[in-house]
Amino acid sequence: MATTRRPMMAANWKMNKTVVEAEQYMAALLPRVAGAEGVDVAVYAPFTSLPAVARMAEDSEVIPGAQNFYHEDSGAFTGEISAPMLLDLGIGSVVVGHSERREIFEESDDLVARKTGRALEAGLIPVVCVGETKEERDSGKMWGKVSGQVRAVVEGLGDVSAESLVFAYEPIWAIGTGDTATPDDAQDASDKIRNLLKELKGEDFASGVRILYGGSVKPENVGEIMSKPDVDGGLVGGASLKADSFIALVEEAQNHAS
Ligand code: PEP
């Protein structure tokens, strides 16, 4: 399958950084990635830092992103943030269904599907996270879990362009543990996801959707992971927290841009 997909390198700061720390990071990042040809660079900041990150990214190619949102636009949803609120700040993308949201905050496949649909309607690029626990992998249930998560999102989708949707395969046992999946594991899961997308939405759609890998990605291992044909980039937690380390990841991703 010919690969014309644009690589993506995404920093997920999780619940880290004050506004001042976010500003310092962006001040270090922006000049260094200004020439990152052919790669989408995205920074998923906590809500409190989003105005600063979005403002600083305004004249750059860096995509400011949120780590979560709620699929209703307004109303009695205390503590939630909606798509129009994110658009108001100039946010371009949102992480949906991160395993920490699924596991700690009990987000269901159905909720993740609703959020994905709303993000797409609003013009926010959803990065939909899917992945299995160690127990599920060890008991041969990896694909049952991951395929169910992908189906829940894709079966309800209307006519959307492949470029507007991103998946991130993130095995839960590899997140924040230092225990990276092998490049072959990442390829195997991405290939399976792409084949399922083909079955559900056709060849053109499947070949255009980007699939990132996430789980202890760092500058030392990203090259080998991204050399796999169905892996289009990384969603990175720990190694994205220092600007220098994230810059190194973006530089490596550039080697995989066409
Ligand atoms: C993540 O935040 O999605 C992630 C993969 O974290 P880490 O890179 O720290 O494993």
Image (tube, helix red, strand yellow):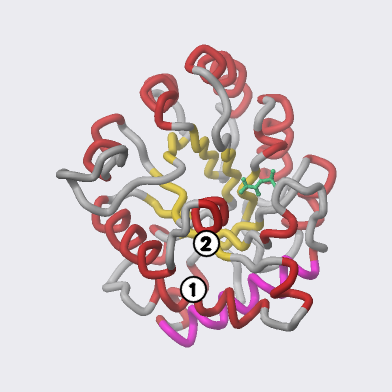
Q: CA distance from mark 1 to mark 2?
A: 9 Å
Q: Residue at x 31, y 54 (%)?
A: 119
The disc label shown at residue 150, or none = 1
Q: Which mark is residue 179?
A: none
Q: Quadrant of residue 248?
A: top right
| Vertical order, 12 against 59 (above or below) | below
Query: Does 251 appear in magenta?
Result: no
Residue at x 66%, y 38% (from the top left corner): 250
Q: Tell me if residue 160 comes above or below residue 84 in the rendering.
A: below
| Residue under the image location 84 percent in, 43 percent down | 220
Which range of residues does the magenta coloring cover?
184-200
Mark 1 and mark 2 residues within 8 Å of each other at the beta carbon: yes
Q: Nearer the viewer, residue 62 or 100?
A: 100
Q: Quadrant of residue 108?
A: bottom left
**Which secondary structure dominates the residues rendered in magenta?**
helix
Instruction: Determine which residue is flagged by label 2.
Output: 167
